[in-house]
Protein backbone atom coordinates (compact mmCIF):
# COMPACT_ATOMS: atom_id res chain seq x y z
CA UNK A 1 0.00 0.00 0.00
CA UNK A 2 2.80 2.41 0.91
CA UNK A 3 4.63 1.70 -2.34
CA UNK A 4 1.45 2.16 -4.37
CA UNK A 5 0.77 5.48 -2.62
CA UNK A 6 4.29 6.69 -3.32
CA UNK A 7 3.96 5.71 -6.98
CA UNK A 8 0.69 7.61 -7.24
CA UNK A 9 2.25 10.67 -5.60
CA UNK A 10 5.29 10.55 -7.89
CA UNK A 11 3.04 10.20 -10.93
CA UNK A 12 1.11 13.28 -9.87
CA UNK A 13 4.36 15.24 -9.68
CA UNK A 14 5.39 14.12 -13.16
CA UNK A 15 1.93 15.00 -14.46
CA UNK A 16 2.17 18.45 -12.88
CA UNK A 17 5.58 19.11 -14.42
CA UNK A 18 4.31 17.99 -17.81
CA UNK A 19 1.08 19.99 -17.58
CA UNK A 20 3.02 23.13 -16.69
CA UNK A 21 5.61 22.38 -19.40
CA UNK A 22 8.43 22.95 -16.94
CA UNK A 23 12.02 23.13 -18.13
CA UNK A 24 14.23 20.72 -16.12
CA UNK A 25 17.21 22.98 -16.71
CA UNK A 26 15.38 25.94 -15.20
CA UNK A 27 14.38 23.87 -12.18
CA UNK A 28 18.00 22.89 -11.64
CA UNK A 29 19.00 26.53 -12.00
CA UNK A 30 16.46 27.58 -9.37
CA UNK A 31 17.78 24.99 -6.91
CA UNK A 32 21.45 25.78 -7.50
CA UNK A 33 20.77 29.51 -7.25
CA UNK A 34 18.81 29.44 -4.01
CA UNK A 35 19.24 32.45 -1.75
CA UNK A 36 20.64 31.33 1.60
CA UNK A 37 18.81 33.90 3.73
CA UNK A 38 15.31 32.61 2.92
CA UNK A 39 16.55 29.02 3.21
CA UNK A 40 17.70 29.76 6.75
CA UNK A 41 14.30 31.36 7.41
CA UNK A 42 12.61 28.13 6.30
CA UNK A 43 14.66 26.15 8.82
CA UNK A 44 13.79 28.62 11.57
CA UNK A 45 10.07 28.56 10.68
CA UNK A 46 10.00 24.76 10.63
CA UNK A 47 11.70 24.74 14.02
CA UNK A 48 8.99 27.06 15.35
CA UNK A 49 6.31 24.78 13.86
CA UNK A 50 7.79 21.78 15.64
CA UNK A 51 8.08 23.66 18.91
CA UNK A 52 4.44 24.79 18.77
CA UNK A 53 3.26 21.26 18.01
CA UNK A 54 5.44 19.84 20.78
CA UNK A 55 4.16 22.41 23.26
CA UNK A 56 0.54 21.60 22.39
CA UNK A 57 1.26 17.91 22.85
CA UNK A 58 2.97 18.54 26.20
CA UNK A 59 0.13 20.71 27.49
CA UNK A 60 -2.51 18.17 26.46
CA UNK A 61 -0.66 15.29 28.12
CA UNK A 62 -0.04 17.14 31.38
CA UNK A 63 -3.65 18.34 31.48
CA UNK A 64 -5.36 15.09 30.52
CA UNK A 65 -3.29 12.78 32.71
CA UNK A 66 -1.91 14.88 35.58
CA UNK A 67 -1.43 11.96 37.98
CA UNK A 68 -0.16 9.19 35.73
CA UNK A 69 1.59 10.90 32.84
CA UNK A 70 5.25 10.23 32.20
CA UNK A 71 7.45 13.17 33.15
CA UNK A 72 9.12 14.36 29.95
CA UNK A 73 11.08 17.54 29.44
CA UNK A 74 10.29 20.05 26.72
CA UNK A 75 13.37 18.86 24.85
CA UNK A 76 12.01 15.32 24.67
CA UNK A 77 8.63 16.48 23.44
CA UNK A 78 10.36 18.62 20.81
CA UNK A 79 12.63 15.76 19.71
CA UNK A 80 9.77 13.30 19.25
CA UNK A 81 7.82 15.93 17.33
CA UNK A 82 10.84 16.71 15.14
CA UNK A 83 11.20 13.02 14.32
CA UNK A 84 7.50 13.03 13.48
CA UNK A 85 8.08 15.85 11.00
CA UNK A 86 10.59 13.67 9.18
CA UNK A 87 8.42 10.56 9.44
CA UNK A 88 5.64 12.63 7.94
CA UNK A 89 7.65 12.78 4.72
CA UNK A 90 7.25 9.00 4.43
CA UNK A 91 3.70 8.65 5.80
CA UNK A 92 0.61 10.84 5.87
CA UNK A 93 1.71 13.72 8.18
CA UNK A 94 -0.77 13.06 11.00
CA UNK A 95 0.07 9.35 10.97
CA UNK A 96 3.79 10.09 10.87
CA UNK A 97 3.57 12.40 13.88
CA UNK A 98 1.60 9.87 15.92
CA UNK A 99 3.93 7.02 14.91
CA UNK A 100 7.11 8.89 15.87
CA UNK A 101 5.65 10.10 19.15
CA UNK A 102 4.32 6.63 20.00
CA UNK A 103 7.70 5.04 19.32
CA UNK A 104 9.54 7.67 21.37
CA UNK A 105 7.17 7.57 24.33
CA UNK A 106 7.05 3.78 24.28
CA UNK A 107 10.84 3.59 24.52
CA UNK A 108 10.69 5.94 27.50
CA UNK A 109 7.99 3.93 29.24
CA UNK A 110 4.95 6.07 28.49
CA UNK A 111 1.41 5.15 27.43
CA UNK A 112 -0.55 5.36 24.21
CA UNK A 113 -2.67 8.15 25.72
CA UNK A 114 0.46 10.29 25.84
CA UNK A 115 1.20 9.69 22.18
CA UNK A 116 -1.61 8.77 19.82
CA UNK A 117 -4.62 10.10 21.74
CA UNK A 118 -2.96 13.34 22.81
CA UNK A 119 -1.61 13.87 19.29
CA UNK A 120 -5.05 13.40 17.77
CA UNK A 121 -6.56 15.88 20.21
CA UNK A 122 -3.99 18.62 19.67
CA UNK A 123 -4.09 18.22 15.88
CA UNK A 124 -7.84 18.85 15.89
CA UNK A 125 -7.04 22.50 16.51
CA UNK A 126 -4.70 22.64 13.50
CA UNK A 127 -7.41 21.16 11.30
CA UNK A 128 -10.06 23.49 12.71
CA UNK A 129 -7.92 26.56 12.04
CA UNK A 130 -7.31 25.41 8.47
CA UNK A 131 -11.07 24.94 7.98
CA UNK A 132 -11.82 28.47 9.20
CA UNK A 133 -9.19 29.99 6.92
CA UNK A 134 -10.26 27.80 4.00
CA UNK A 135 -13.80 29.18 4.26
CA UNK A 136 -12.43 32.70 3.81
CA UNK A 137 -10.24 31.60 0.89
CA UNK A 138 -13.13 29.90 -0.90
CA UNK A 139 -15.23 33.04 -0.42
CA UNK A 140 -12.37 35.11 -1.85
CA UNK A 141 -12.17 32.88 -4.92
CA UNK A 142 -15.94 32.70 -5.45
CA UNK A 143 -16.53 36.44 -5.00
CA UNK A 144 -13.23 37.62 -6.57
CA UNK A 145 -12.32 39.55 -3.46
CA UNK A 146 -9.28 41.79 -3.12
CA UNK A 147 -6.39 40.90 -0.74
CA UNK A 148 -7.69 43.29 1.93
CA UNK A 149 -11.15 41.71 1.75
CA UNK A 150 -9.57 38.24 2.01
CA UNK A 151 -7.72 39.31 5.16
CA UNK A 152 -10.92 40.67 6.71
CA UNK A 153 -12.85 37.52 5.78
CA UNK A 154 -10.13 35.37 7.34
CA UNK A 155 -10.21 37.38 10.57
CA UNK A 156 -14.00 37.12 10.79
CA UNK A 157 -13.97 33.37 10.01
CA UNK A 158 -11.31 32.71 12.67
CA UNK A 159 -13.16 34.79 15.27
CA UNK A 160 -16.38 32.87 14.64
CA UNK A 161 -14.45 29.60 14.67
CA UNK A 162 -12.87 30.31 18.04
CA UNK A 163 -16.23 31.33 19.50
CA UNK A 164 -17.93 28.17 18.23
CA UNK A 165 -15.07 26.04 19.55
CA UNK A 166 -15.38 27.53 23.02
CA UNK A 167 -19.14 26.93 23.01
CA UNK A 168 -18.69 23.37 21.72
CA UNK A 169 -16.08 22.43 24.33
CA UNK A 170 -18.26 23.83 27.11
CA UNK A 171 -21.25 21.85 25.87
CA UNK A 172 -19.21 18.67 25.46
CA UNK A 173 -17.78 19.06 28.96
CA UNK A 174 -21.31 19.31 30.33
CA UNK A 175 -22.41 16.16 28.50
CA UNK A 176 -19.42 14.17 29.74
CA UNK A 177 -19.65 15.05 33.42
CA UNK A 178 -23.36 15.37 34.04
CA UNK A 179 -25.16 12.75 36.09
CA UNK A 180 -27.42 11.23 33.43
CA UNK A 181 -29.16 7.94 34.38
CA UNK A 182 -29.54 7.08 30.69
CA UNK A 183 -25.79 7.15 30.27
CA UNK A 184 -25.00 5.01 33.30
CA UNK A 185 -22.88 1.86 33.39
CA UNK A 186 -25.70 -0.21 31.82
CA UNK A 187 -25.51 1.71 28.55
CA UNK A 188 -22.73 1.41 25.99
CA UNK A 189 -22.07 5.14 26.10
CA UNK A 190 -21.97 5.03 29.89
CA UNK A 191 -19.35 2.29 29.93
CA UNK A 192 -17.27 4.14 27.33
CA UNK A 193 -17.55 7.36 29.31
CA UNK A 194 -16.40 5.66 32.50
CA UNK A 195 -13.47 4.01 30.71
CA UNK A 196 -12.31 7.30 29.26
CA UNK A 197 -12.93 9.25 32.47
CA UNK A 198 -10.71 6.80 34.37
CA UNK A 199 -7.80 7.72 32.10
CA UNK A 200 -8.44 11.30 31.05
CA UNK A 201 -9.37 14.41 33.00
CA UNK A 202 -12.05 15.70 30.62
CA UNK A 203 -13.04 18.67 32.73
CA UNK A 204 -9.49 19.99 32.61
CA UNK A 205 -9.00 19.07 28.93
CA UNK A 206 -12.13 20.96 27.87
CA UNK A 207 -11.38 24.01 29.98
CA UNK A 208 -11.79 27.29 28.03
CA UNK A 209 -8.36 28.51 29.14
CA UNK A 210 -6.75 25.41 27.64
CA UNK A 211 -8.78 25.87 24.46
CA UNK A 212 -7.49 29.42 24.11
CA UNK A 213 -3.93 28.22 24.64
CA UNK A 214 -4.18 25.45 22.06
CA UNK A 215 -5.80 27.77 19.52
CA UNK A 216 -3.02 30.32 20.06
CA UNK A 217 -0.30 27.69 19.61
CA UNK A 218 -2.03 26.37 16.48
CA UNK A 219 -2.20 29.93 15.12
CA UNK A 220 1.53 30.40 15.74
CA UNK A 221 2.25 27.09 14.04
CA UNK A 222 0.06 28.06 11.10
CA UNK A 223 1.82 31.41 10.81
CA UNK A 224 5.21 29.66 10.77
CA UNK A 225 3.91 27.34 8.04
CA UNK A 226 3.00 30.36 5.90
CA UNK A 227 6.38 31.99 6.54
CA UNK A 228 8.15 28.77 5.53
CA UNK A 229 6.22 28.52 2.25
CA UNK A 230 6.71 32.21 1.40
CA UNK A 231 10.42 31.90 2.18
CA UNK A 232 10.56 29.13 -0.44
CA UNK A 233 9.25 31.60 -3.01
CA UNK A 234 11.84 34.15 -1.90
CA UNK A 235 14.62 31.55 -1.99
CA UNK A 236 13.82 30.70 -5.62
CA UNK A 237 13.10 34.33 -6.54
CA UNK A 238 9.60 33.38 -7.71
CA UNK A 239 6.92 36.09 -8.13
CA UNK A 240 4.42 34.80 -5.57
CA UNK A 241 2.98 37.26 -3.05
CA UNK A 242 2.73 36.60 0.67
CA UNK A 243 -1.06 36.98 0.69
CA UNK A 244 -1.38 34.46 -2.14
CA UNK A 245 0.66 31.89 -0.22
CA UNK A 246 -1.35 32.55 2.94
CA UNK A 247 -4.66 32.32 1.07
CA UNK A 248 -3.97 28.92 -0.50
CA UNK A 249 -2.28 27.44 2.58
CA UNK A 250 -5.48 26.19 4.29
CA UNK A 251 -6.54 24.38 1.13
CA UNK A 252 -3.13 22.69 0.92
CA UNK A 253 -3.25 21.72 4.60
CA UNK A 254 -6.71 20.17 4.33
CA UNK A 255 -5.98 18.23 1.13
CA UNK A 256 -2.88 16.76 2.75
CA UNK A 257 -4.88 15.77 5.84
CA UNK A 258 -7.38 13.77 3.78
CA UNK A 259 -4.90 12.29 1.30
CA UNK A 260 -3.46 8.81 1.72
CA UNK A 261 -0.15 9.40 -0.08
CA UNK A 262 3.04 10.05 1.94
CA UNK A 263 3.21 13.71 2.98
CA UNK A 264 0.46 14.44 0.46
CA UNK A 265 3.01 13.92 -2.32
CA UNK A 266 1.60 15.28 -5.55
CA UNK A 267 -1.70 16.24 -3.93
CA UNK A 268 -0.09 19.14 -2.08
CA UNK A 269 1.67 20.36 -5.22
CA UNK A 270 -1.45 20.22 -7.39
CA UNK A 271 -3.42 22.10 -4.73
CA UNK A 272 -0.82 24.86 -4.49
CA UNK A 273 -0.44 25.17 -8.26
CA UNK A 274 -4.17 25.17 -9.00
CA UNK A 275 -5.17 27.56 -6.21
CA UNK A 276 -2.34 30.00 -6.90
CA UNK A 277 -3.32 30.05 -10.57
CA UNK A 278 -6.88 31.00 -9.63
CA UNK A 279 -5.43 33.85 -7.54
CA UNK A 280 -3.46 35.21 -10.49
CA UNK A 281 -0.11 33.39 -10.49
CA UNK A 282 0.90 31.87 -13.86
CA UNK A 283 0.49 28.10 -13.74
CA UNK A 284 4.13 27.40 -14.62
CA UNK A 285 5.34 29.70 -11.82
CA UNK A 286 2.88 28.16 -9.37
CA UNK A 287 4.09 24.66 -10.29
CA UNK A 288 7.73 25.71 -9.84
CA UNK A 289 6.88 27.12 -6.43
CA UNK A 290 5.05 23.95 -5.39
CA UNK A 291 7.95 21.69 -6.41
CA UNK A 292 10.55 23.96 -4.81
CA UNK A 293 8.52 24.15 -1.60
CA UNK A 294 8.42 20.34 -1.49
CA UNK A 295 12.18 20.06 -1.99
CA UNK A 296 12.98 22.61 0.72
CA UNK A 297 10.48 21.08 3.14
CA UNK A 298 12.15 17.68 2.84
CA UNK A 299 15.55 19.23 3.52
CA UNK A 300 14.09 21.21 6.41
CA UNK A 301 12.52 18.09 7.92
CA UNK A 302 15.89 16.34 7.85
CA UNK A 303 17.56 19.33 9.51
CA UNK A 304 14.89 19.64 12.23
CA UNK A 305 15.06 15.90 12.94
CA UNK A 306 18.83 16.20 13.35
CA UNK A 307 18.28 19.14 15.70
CA UNK A 308 15.75 17.08 17.65
CA UNK A 309 18.26 14.26 18.01
CA UNK A 310 20.87 16.71 19.27
CA UNK A 311 18.42 18.17 21.79
CA UNK A 312 17.49 14.69 23.01
CA UNK A 313 21.12 13.71 23.51
CA UNK A 314 22.02 17.00 25.17
CA UNK A 315 19.09 16.89 27.57
CA UNK A 316 20.04 13.45 28.91
CA UNK A 317 16.47 13.19 30.20
CA UNK A 318 15.55 10.22 32.40
CA UNK A 319 11.76 10.13 32.72
CA UNK A 320 9.91 8.79 35.74
CA UNK A 321 6.18 8.36 36.15
CA UNK A 322 4.37 10.85 38.35
CA UNK A 323 2.75 8.07 40.34
CA UNK A 324 6.10 6.44 41.12
CA UNK A 325 7.71 9.74 42.03
CA UNK A 326 4.93 10.62 44.44
CA UNK A 327 5.05 7.22 46.10
CA UNK A 328 8.73 7.68 46.83
Image: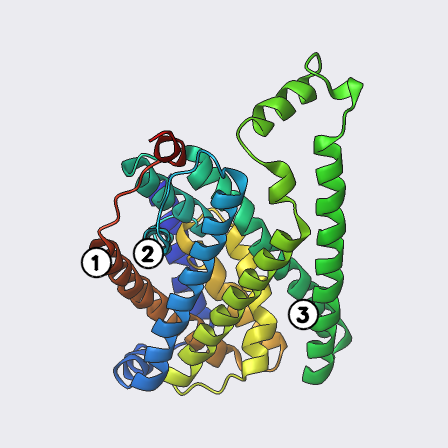
Q: Are marks 3 and 2 in contact (CB under 8 Å)?
A: no
Dot in front, 3 or 2: 2
The circle on residue 327 is: none
Q: Are marks 1 and 2 in contact (CB under 8 Å)?
A: yes
Residue 34 visible in the picture: no
Q: Quadrant of residue 175?
A: top right
Image point 71% across, 15% down: which residue? Answer: 187
Residue that carries the numbered disc 3 in the rendered image: 137
Does label 1 or label 2 sit earlier along the sequence? 2
Percent of width and height locating residue 98: 42, 44
Q: Vertically, is 187 above or below 156? A: above
Residue that carries the numbered disc 2 in the rendered image: 75
Residue 24 visible in the picture: yes
Dot in front, 3 or 1: 1
The CA span between labels 1 and 2 is 9 Å
Does label 3 or label 2 sit earlier along the sequence? 2
Identify the element where label 3 is drawn.
helix
Does 217 sit left or right of 73 as displayed?
A: right
Does 318 sit left or right of 1 as displayed?
A: left
Q: Quadrant of the C terminus?
A: top left
Does label 3 or label 1 sit earlier along the sequence? 3
Q: Quadrant of residue 310?
A: bottom left
Identify the element where label 1 is drawn.
helix
Q: Quadrant of the N terminus?
A: top left
Residue that carries the numbered disc 1 in the rendered image: 314
Does 254 sit left or right of 235 as displayed?
A: right
Say which of 211 and 3 sits in front: 211
Packing grade of label 2 (10 A; few <14, some 14-19, many >=20) is: many
Q: Vertically, is 23 above or below 116? A: below
Amino acid sequence: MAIASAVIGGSLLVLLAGRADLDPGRLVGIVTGLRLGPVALIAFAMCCMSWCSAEKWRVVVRTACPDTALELGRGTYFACTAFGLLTGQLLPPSVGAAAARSAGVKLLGGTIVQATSATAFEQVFDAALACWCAAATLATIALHLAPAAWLLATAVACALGVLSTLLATRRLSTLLVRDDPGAGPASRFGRLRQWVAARVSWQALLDPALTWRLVALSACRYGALIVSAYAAALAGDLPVALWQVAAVMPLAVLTVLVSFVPAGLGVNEWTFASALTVLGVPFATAAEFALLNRFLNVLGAVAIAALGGAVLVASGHRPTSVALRRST
